[in-house]
Image (spheres, helix red, strand yellow):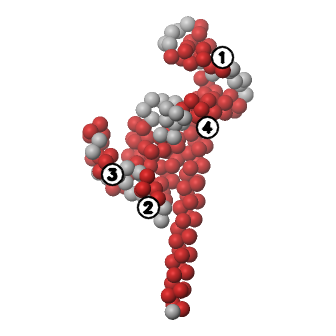
Amino acid sequence: MPKALIRRYLPSPDKIRAQKSLGFLRHRLGDPSVWHLNRRSASLAMFWGLFFSFMPMPFQMVPATLTALALRINLPMVLVLTWLTNPITILPCMYVAYAMGSLILGVPMLSWSDMDGLFSAMMSLESSSTASSANAPLKPFLVGTIVMGVGLGSLGYLGMQVYWRWHVAKQWQARSARRALTQRT
């Protein structure tokens, strides 16, 4: 089963339960279903982990954790997948999301020099004309992040379903071949 491969890269339940910052969730973290790894749990974890990795918010792991606990899906896998967008990959991922949102909405993209002004205007909480002009590219950005999150999450879900079925079929074939070999001897 693909469980061994996936479990090799995920932190153990005891390691996550030992985190002092998660003390208020201890009763939910004791639920065995959030640690169980099966096709449903792994596939939904792929969807929600990839979805939340593209949400433009700080602390993406918080809503990802709450979703995993509410849906009772594999928590470590969801948390690991939210780190697809990390400090190294966040800018290229968000730029691709903005480009996709601009393409979907039919809005021309800003040039790199305008992007610099956009980021500084978004960081300052002024209500001047610069801040209102900064809201213009916000709509394509948000549309792009949602489309990327849902799209990649769906691809991850389907990919895990296909991988799981392929792996189980391969195991069955190997088992049948071993049985046939044993019956001949």
Placement of 109 over or under 33, stated as above or below: above
Q: Element at badge 1?
A: helix
Q: Are marks 2 and 4 in contact (CB under 8 Å)?
A: no
- Of the image marks 2 and 4, the number of the one nearer the N terminus: 2
- Of the image marks 1 and 4, the number of the one nearer the N terminus: 1
- Of the image marks 1 and 3, the number of the one nearer the N terminus: 3
Label 3: which residue? 13
Q: Is residue 109 left or right of residue 145?
A: right
Q: Amino acid at mark 1?
A: Ser
CA distance separating discs 1 and 4: 26 Å
Where residue 76 appears, x then y in whole percent? 40, 48
Q: Is residue 5 visible?
A: yes
Q: Element at badge 4?
A: helix
Foreground: disc 1 or disc 4:
1
Q: Are marks 1 and 4 in contact (CB under 8 Å)?
A: no
CA distance separating discs 1 and 3: 47 Å
Label 1: which residue? 113
- Of the image marks 2 and 1, the number of the one nearer the N terminus: 2
Kindly give the residue lying farthest to the top in the view shown: 128
CA distance separating discs 2 and 3: 15 Å
Res 134 label: none
Q: Element at badge 3?
A: helix
Of 71 and 172, which appears nearest the observer? 172
Q: Residue at x 60, y 14 (%)?
A: 117
Q: Amino acid at mark 2?
A: Ala
Q: Is residue 71 visible?
A: no
- Of the image marks 2 and 3, the number of the one nearer the N terminus: 2
Q: Element at badge 2?
A: helix
Label 4: which residue? 147
Q: Is residue 12 left or right of residue 45?
A: left
Instruction: Assess disc 2: are there few (<14), some (14-19) or many (≥20) residues with their C-alpha within 10 Å of its C-alpha.
Output: few
Res 4 label: 2
